[in-house]
Amino acid sequence: MDIQTLNMIIRERFAALKAAKEAGQSSTELAVITGALLLGAGLLVVAIKTKLLEKIGIINGG
């Protein structure tokens, strides 16, 4: 997983959530956008953890 791509997706979803809230979208639509935002955030955490574990492995192995 590419951290920059996930970061960009999260920023886009947050902007969509903010715009939808200001436009008066229904709570169901806001829930779907929020769910996508949380999913992206979870994937970002996993990507960062994986990258960090790779770096630790390189330091300990070398």
Image (cartoon, rainbow, N blue to C red):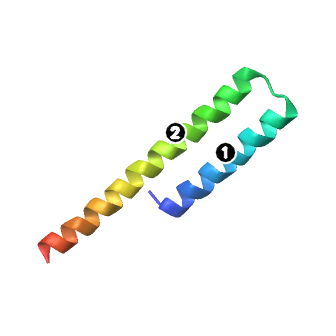
Secondary structure of the residue carrying tag 2 is: helix
User: Which amino acid is tagged 2?
Assistant: Leu
Mark 1 residue crowding within 10 angstroms, few (<14) / some (14–19) / many (20+): some
Locate the N terminus and report the quarter of the image it occupies: bottom left
Label 2 vs 1, first from the N-terminus: 1
Of residues 5 and 23, which is closer to you in this image? 23
Q: Pointer 1: what residue?
A: 13
Q: Amino acid at mark 1?
A: Arg
Q: Secondary structure at mark 1?
A: helix
Q: With respect to residue 14, does 25 lie above or below?
A: above
- Residue at 80 percent of width and 41 percent of height: 19
- Quickly name the residue at label 2: 39
Q: Position of residue 7 (x, y in %)?
A: 56, 56
Question: What residue do we see at 22% from left, 66% from top?
Answer: 56
Badge 2: few (under 14), some or many (20 or more) residues near its Cα, within 10 Å? few
Locate residue 23 relative to residue 27 in the image: left or right: right
Q: Quadrant of residue 28?
A: top right
Q: Which label was assigned to residue 58?
A: none
Q: Quadrant of residue 22?
A: top right
Task: Name which residue lies at 19% across and 66% down.
Answer: 57
Residue shown at the point (46%, 46%) measured from the top left: 43
Q: Quadrant of the C terminus?
A: bottom left
Compute the Cα span from label 2 to label 1. Answer: 10 Å
The image shows residue 20, relative to residue 56, as above or below, that is above
Place of residue 52 in the rendered image (x, y in percent of width and height, measured from the top left): 31, 62
Query: Up-down: is 32 above or below 62?
Result: above
Q: Position of residue 51 (x, y in %)?
A: 34, 62
Q: Is residue 29 left or right of residue 40?
A: right
Residue lying furthest bottom: 62
Asked whether, in this view, residue 10 is left or right of residue 1, the answer is right
